[in-house]
Image: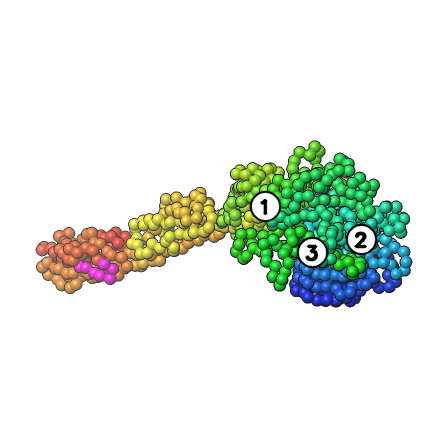
Amino acid sequence: IYVNGWAHNLTISNNRIYGNAGTFSGGVRVGQPYLEGQALPPAVGPRFGFGYDNNISIHHNKITNNGTIESNIGENGGGGGVSICSGTDNYALNYNFICGNYSQGDGGGVGHIGLSNPGTIAHNKIIFNQSFFQGQNTSGGGIVIEGESSTLGGLSIGTGSVTVDANLIQGNQAGGGHGGGIRLQNVNGADISGQNRSGMWNVQITNNMIVNNVAGWAGGGLSLSDVSRSSIFNNTIENNDSTATVGAVFTSSPTQSSFQPAGISSELHSPGLAAATNQLFSQPTLANNIIWHNRSFYFQAGTTDATGATSTTLIPTLTSKAGYACPDGANYWDLGVLGQPQASPALRLNPVHSILTDTTGYPASNLNTFGRTSVMREYCNGPRVNPGAADTTPSAPPVQFGMQPAAAEDEGGNWIDLRFGPLSLSDSSISVGGAGYGELVGDYHLAAGSQAINQVACNQPSNTRISHDFDGDARPQPTCSIPLVSTETFYDIGADEVSAAQGTVTFAPSPANFGTISVGTTKDLAIVGTVAGASVTFNSAVRTGSTTFSIVSDGCSGTTVSAGSTCTITVRFTPGNSTQARTGTLTVNDNAASSPQTVALAGQGARGTVSVTPNPVAFGTNPVGTPVPLAVTVSNSGAAALTINSDAVTGTNFSKGTDGCAGVTLQPTGTCTVTVIFTPTIGNAGTGSTNRAGILTIISNASNGFAFFNITGTAVQAVVGISAPSPSMNTGGRSLKSATITVSNTGAAALTVTGANVAKTAGPALGAFSVTGGTCLTSPNVPAGQSCTVTVSYAPPQTGTSLQSTGHLVLTDTGASTGTQNGASFNAN
């Protein structure tokens, strides 16, 4: 992939880029190197830069087995996998797998060539890449960040500022030069001014695991040349090798070289840079690094056998152990300035707060530590293939368990080819399903009990503090207290921060459902946090969402709760007068593993609802005269409690009896009883029935606060009709006269006859009326619409001349509007 110019904001992601070859880069190249006439650009906005390709993002690609062909003869630079060339400002090269790429120039894996400002190379795996060329020295097996030589004369304009963070840089080889893992070269130059003697550009190398890389000259892990300003913080630089196999180190003998710095190698400044900076050599700020067991070798050609073959070896000659365990007898040279002796050098790098193989010569005030780092799994470079794995090459020679230098003296230049392994992250000799299959050969995360844990105090300069580690885990950033008494005021040396065992918190109930409660009331709910595993420090508890929820007490925030114990936060729900469903969230911040914890809050205001049974309050048909009580059940059919303030009964013939409800509070489904009395009356004696209506009123705080329920009833009575005697009793003569009077009930209620007689209103004293029989006397109950009879007689006087008398029937009964009815007068003669 070749991106030329003005491709601003381009993203190259999620590709497999393999097996490609090109002039300046085999895999991905952005921009054009070595443009003529490039001078230090002016500031554009907040930064300096050419702006040819701004904001390029290259992420999540697999970039493998690419290479440069005859790259940049006479010039350094190439980038076998990725090349970032001048003017690629504000680029990000993140989360890529860059493996097995080759460059004949600098930068087997990644090459940052020229001025691109700023840049980020982070979270990549840059492994098993190689830079090598026989005709010239090439550097940066994994990464090179280098400025271009100025075509205008004078100092290089440099590289711009670059951050190299949290990368795995492993197993790379700079076979023809410096910096098996990383090479920084010509970073600073024209950016240096009288006001800024260190330069504007700063390369920051943080949180990287730079391990098991090899340099043919010096700096198996990291090499710096013409770098006046750089920072190297919290890296693990371990088990890198320098082999002194490039032609330039054979200065005193054509068959033997000399030891060179192996971990971090610095070089004397070029005269122009030394004059501009008043510095002698590249002196990075070194803090909080593991720089451990970086091996330094030199090459020696031995005796010649009868066939003319000359034996070659690296000194010290080491034999690898099973599983790439590191052999004894190595020469370790972690830090050095090129050209200075290993023992008692006049010029030294200045590490602080670091773990070194040897702290001799560094002042105690630097707080460096000597001791094993105790990582999860380490290895040392050895044979080309895994021990135990068969070499399938036809007629392959036996595998030598060590790094193997092979000389080709007739080719000139860099004439030694170094072969080493493993070239695999895991042990390929283990079959699928076998014990240890897929496990990393090298895992440089800190093991429990490592001397690197909790070694860096919080009171060191703030510019050396790193907020995260190789894995993105947070490093402690506590407020520093003196004296330093808590392990929380320290963090770890190297790329890995070992996370302290974190407690866990479980809150219950979760979710916290307040249910439905009466409007105008409140409900408190205790939300209890239970701590497990390790103690937890609670920082804050915050309520968000509906303001109907509030924290009324917080027993967690500001406390440290030990494992197995609890703390409580009480939340109150106040629905007010609303019946709307409400939601909220309780968020608790702490140092537990799952921080922050959230608890969903839910609640709803509700009102009770007044219901009555029966409804309507129906008395049906009732005869007049007798009060009828009816017990009415009042219930709360709503979702919240209600309080009955008062109740009343209105309407003709209706009244309230016993009251068990006024002033009572009913919970949902609760009941009480009030008695309604119906006393039926009908004002008109001639009316058989009258419908009555009333209202039961219940006043409460329910949703139907003024509840009205109908009361119904029908008053019924008998209506009495009395006929004239039949036959007529007005027939004359002194004989006994008899007749029948019909009593009819035309009303709606039954009539019960209790008595009957004839009242005489006129006539001779000796004339007499009497009731002699009839069904009204023998069957006194007369249903509505029926009738009965009364037999009456008249006995005229036997003397005198006046025989005629006048009378009427008097009927006594129940069921009518009155208890006595008088029939019409009739004459008897």
Secondary structure under tag 3 reads strand
User: Does residue 518 show up magenta in the picture?
Assistant: no
User: Which corner quadrant of the image does residue 99 belong to?
Assistant: bottom right
- Give amino acid for label 2: Pro
Nearer mark to the viewer, of 2 and 3? 2
For marks 2 and 1, give the one nearer the viewer.
2
- Residue 559 position within the rendered picture, expressed as x and y whole percent measured from the top left: 60, 37
Residue 141's image quarter? Answer: bottom right
- The answer to whether residue 192 is visible is no
Measure the alpha-carbon separation of dots 2 and 3: 21 Å
**Which mark is first along the chain, 1 or 2?**
2
On residue 254, which mark appears? Answer: 2
Distance (Cα) linking label 2 and label 1: 61 Å
What x and y, as percent, mark residue 650? 41, 51
Total tally of numbered discs in the picture: 3
Judged from the image, the secondary structure of the residue bearing numbered disc 2 is loop
Q: Tell me the CA gap for discs 1 and 3.
A: 46 Å
Sequence order check: which comes first, mark 2 or mark 3?
Answer: 2
For the point 75% across and 67% down, the residue is 22
Q: Residues within 10 Å of mark 1 (few under 14, many from 20)?
A: few
Q: The disc labelled 3 sits on which kind of residue?
A: Arg
Q: Secondary structure at mark 1?
A: loop
Q: In the rendered view, does 533 fall on the left or right side of 696? A: right
**Relative to residue 766, is residue 78 depicted above or below?**
below
Tell which residue pokes out farthest to the front in this image. 306
Task: Judge by depth and name the residue closer to the eye, 625 or 629.
Answer: 629
Q: Amino acid at mark 1?
A: Ala
Q: Which mark is residue 593?
A: 1
Kindly identify the residue that appears in the image at 68 percent across and 54 percent down. 420
What are the residue bounds of the magenta stretch? 783-789
Task: Please name the residue that numbered disc 3 is placed on.
Answer: 419
